[in-house]
Image (cartoon, helix red, strand yellow):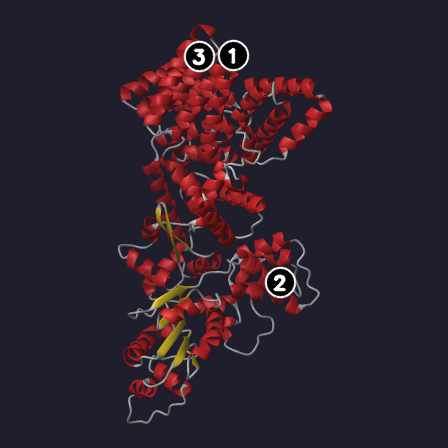
Amino acid sequence: MRHRLEVARLVSVVGPGGIGKTRLALEVARGCGSRYADGVVFVDMAPLAAPELVVQAVARSLGLRIELDREPQAAIVSLLVPRQLLLVLDNCEHLVQACAELVTALLQNCRHVSVLVTSREPLGVEGEMLSRLGPLDERSGIDLLIDRARAQSADFDPGDETILRQLCQALDCLPLAIELAAARTNVLTPTEILGRLTDRFALLARAKPRAGETRHQTLRATVDWSYELLEASESQLFRRLGVFTGQFDLAGATAMGGADTLDVLGRLVDKSLVVAQPTVRGTRYRLLDTLRQYAWDRLHEVGEVELARSRHLHYFLERAQSLFTPTDSVDGPNRELDAELDDLRSAFEWSLEADPQAGLRLIGVTRDVWWRRSFAEGRRWARTFLERCPEPTLARAQALTTAALVEVLDNPADARRLLTQARSLAERLDETTLAVVDYRLGFAAFVEEHTDHAIRHLERALSEMERLGDQHGSVIVHIILAWALLPDHGRREEARVRLERALQQARELSDRYAAGTADYGLGLYWRWSGHPGRALVHFRSVLDTTRALEIMPTTAATLMHVARLLAPSEPIRAARVAGAGLAAAKRSGVRLPPRLLRSIEHLHSEVGQRLGDEHASRAWADGERLTMDEAVALALEQARPDPLRPGGLSSRELDVTRLAARGLSSPEIGELLHLSPRTVDNHLARVYAKLGLSSRFQLASWYVQTTSLE
């Protein structure tokens, strides 16, 4: 901030209410004041009710008496022309135009005057340098909470910092919110405060108001201050954006507003009520949780909840439909929706009450989201809407297919029953859906080990997809058909040829899921053909692919196969990999197929014979404590530090480090590497532990120094 004052004569500190703009301005003024021969003049604009009072307040702070026959602004300019001072204008958001006019005159005529402004939106003056002030970082938020709580009581014990971290996150790390929460620690524990934040505006009010402006006595008052300054179109859009639980794009905002949404949204960003974040998918927007709850409260007050939630539901339905093709791969365009699960849940919840048919259509076109993210949740939504919407429609056929997909590994017989119902509808309604249903019937039969039935359904599905000219659909059916052929010694070579051809086609189509599925089949082929080394190459390729795509069923199953291949030479590592894979599958609600469970029993017996039951059990239990990332690293021979890699980091950890050093956030890194933000944070935590660092700034410095030495 001091550096900015050195390079610009006007610096505006912009941010939402309660962020600490005034405190920062005062600290900067104290630090820079000695550089100005005539010192610092501070003017608080908050109490002023009319634009014409701006120049009078500044004149009064300068000790300037304004005579009735003089123009106040001209008098101020005349006084300051020879002066060298820093003028601080605090809380200008409700008087932006008047402040802008005065500042423009000063910058044009007073060469040695600098201006520091705090506001919730920029002045829009030429030469203005913005310093957008966001929430505190997590560590600073925790430290502020502890400091203010100990000011309430010197005996305050922070206890488990996990709770303090969660509390700061829930408060968006807003300094005012943290201070108000700390004021409650004399009567509530941090855990109790956290549990009451559903009504944060009532909770976070000063029990004993201190002297000073009332708008900072409660969290609601400081947000009210910003809201009341909005134009009608701005307040309407702000309220409606409260229905989004996560990030949204311009199209989502437009669904809440209208033709002029871009301009209105831009003004809300300028006024620090909406956060804009550049990402690899374009600009994304969000409301801080505190502001979102406030917008939601206002939405209720004006009776627009039904309108906003209905628009939200139909926006996500239309978006999901636009990203859906019945024969698309799990690596298809609807991966975009994985980052918006909370909003999908909100849409489903509203459709239960307002439009069950829309919910049925939505569950049908989000089929692959639940395969990637949660079988249990997909199963729950599908069952709910199928019960409520019995009409024989294409939407029901697609919803039945979704229900079967998330059921197939847990209960393949039930999945087959659902698919049979879907097939009777699809025969009359849509030939593409019919081909998909036949493919799913084949897969269900394969899981049940009914090989003849599986082959018959898959061959029928393949014929139909090839007739339709569907390349993506044909490739995946080719692969699963090859899986079904592999156990047959007489057709195993045919299966290999199909898999190798499909692998090449999948790569040409840039379909990572299909390529990983083909590699899995080739791993089986080479393992069953007595070539463990070649099998291991393919299975490790599968892990690279499916872990990046976060496909838990395939990742867990592949870990088991890698463990079987490692067992003869490395039984301890094999037991750990198997224990980790099996535990991760259980935690995720994934039930492995019967043939794989029999293979695991054989592996357990084998490592027991090689190590002895006690050592084998201990290694297996060690594996169960590993995260999935650690298990994959162990299976990929990345568990031991590689002296050729800086800091002993794995290739994935280096990728994450490189992007973090460039300043990308966890969600942005996740989008580039196809990882969830939580997985990115887990990688960063391990990197910090390996390197003995504690912040992204330190990590960036380490990376720059390390790469400069290479």
Query: Up-down: is 274 above or below 52?
Result: above
Q: Quadrant of the C terminus?
A: top left
Q: CA distance from mark 2 to mark 1?
A: 62 Å
Q: Earlier in the sequence, mark 2 or mark 3?
A: 2
Quadrant in the rendering for residue 71 = bottom left
Disc 3 and disc 1 in contact, CB within 8 angstroms: no
User: Image quadrant of residue 43?
Assistant: bottom left
Q: Position of residue 323 (x, y in %)?
A: 34, 37
Asked if marks 2 and 3 touch (Cβ < 8 Å), the reply is: no
Q: Earlier in the sequence, mark 3 or mark 1?
A: 3
Q: Amino acid at mark 1?
A: Gly
Indicate left or right for 698 with 430 as reference. right
Q: Nearer the viewer, residue 605 or 465?
A: 605
| Secondary structure beneath label 1 | loop
Task: Name the residue that disc number 3 marks.
Answer: 485
- Residue appearing at x 45%, y 61% in the figure: 134
- Residue beneath label 2, please? 146
Query: What residue occupies the far top of the structure in this picture?
Result: 490
Give the labeled residue for mark 1: 530
Q: Amino acid at mark 3?
A: Leu
Instruction: Answer whether labels 2 and 1 touch (C-beta < 8 Å).
Output: no
Under circle 2, the secondary element is helix
